[in-house]
Image (cartoon, rainbow, N blue to C red):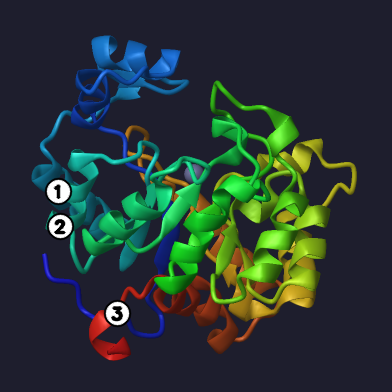
Amino acid sequence: MAGRSTVPGDVVDAHVHLFARGLFLEQVERGRALPEPLARALETRRLGRRGEPLPDLAPEEMAAWYAHRLDEAGIAKAVVMSVFEDSEYMRRFVRAAAGRIFALTTLDPTASGAAVLLEREMAAGFRGVKLLPVNRHFYLSDPACRPFFEKAAELACPITVHYGVTIGPTGDLRYADPTDLSPVARDFPEITFVIAHFGAGYFSETLRLAYQCDNVCVDSSGTNNWMDYDPHGFTLAQVFERALLALGPERILFGTDSGTTAPYRSWIAYQQRRTLEEIGLGERERDTILRRNAVRIFSLDEEELR
Ligand SMILES: [Zn+2]
């Protein structure tokens, strides 16, 4: 499934997910506790609010399945956010999907072995790290994270962070404020940070952080239903406009937050592409958001970058 280099007009989804029975099973086999909805999904083979079927495919089959699904949706490349750390299933998927679908690993940056694990995962082909402070309950400003960030800086490893509200069952909003990243983004300018979902309810904090630190970007992924809980009453067009004003097009990445149980979220891709047109962005700026930023930050078109 060799991936070709992207060209203007292609769309790259910088934030998708992978849920598969084998991935969950691996966790159980390694003695790790699964959150309740995932444990139930192992038995019922269904996941999510609508009880969609959970794919039961080997990693290599999953890579082919995923590539086909992107073909159908007209998406050139995609970046999967891992939800489990140190997963052989994900490593096999990354190898099989090489060139077309990429992945960020995930880990606990406060753990003593985090730097070593990061080095190993990057060598295995991951393109960065996804951190989940809200779900895993850590502060990135914690000095215990320093060795991890030093390694990430050495490897020029991009980091996507989910702050803000979450549908995850373990969410704790005490860890949700992107302001916590401020001293880290300041001290590690070599690392590109991508705040997922425009900060998921912490849009103001995200913009303030981005004001302080040039190395902070946002992704637009998901339904952005956090807007319903935001007193500003922004529309998606206004969110994009504020982000463009504050960050510029080079620091906004397109994403849908699609999983693998429900169908690919073509409606979100359509809605966001239309919104970018409606607010009057030119072709070049739209291409920057829809393709170029993800390619640059996550090194998705290797042959051109070397
Ligand atoms: Zn996500």
The residue indicated by pointer 3 is 301
Question: Which amino acid type is marked by label 3?
Answer: Asp
* Position above or below: 295 against 15: below
Question: Which amino acid type is marked by label 1?
Answer: Arg
Q: Residue at x 62, y 27 (%)?
A: 171
Q: Residue at x 61, y 37 (%)?
A: 138
Image coordinates for residue 103, horizontal then vertical, percent: 33, 55
Determine which of the numbered discs, if any, sits on residue 265 in the image: none
Which is more toward the observer, 220 or 95? Answer: 95
Residue 12 placement: quadrant: bottom left
Whether ligand 1 has any atom under 8 Å from the Cβ at mark 2 is answered as no
Q: Residue at x 79, y 71 (%)?
A: 212
- 42 horizontally vs 193: left or right: left
- 3 horizontally vs 305: left or right: left
Quadrant location of the N terminus? bottom left
Under circle 2, the secondary element is helix
Q: Earlier in the sequence, mark 2 or mark 3?
A: 2
- 211 horizontally vs 138: left or right: right
Image coordinates for residue 59, horizontal then vertical, percent: 14, 42
Q: Specify few, some or many for label 2: CA neighbours under 10 Å numbering under 14, 14-19, or 20 or more.
A: some
Question: Please, which residue is most extreme toward the right here?
Answer: 231
Which is more toward the observer, 175 or 167? Answer: 175
The residue indicated by pointer 2 is 95
* Position above or below: 266 against 21: below
In this orientation, does residue 260 appear?
yes
Label pair 1/2, CB-CB below 8 angstroms: yes
Question: Which amino acid type is marked by label 2?
Answer: Arg
Determine which of the numbered discs, if any, sits on residue 92 in the image: 1
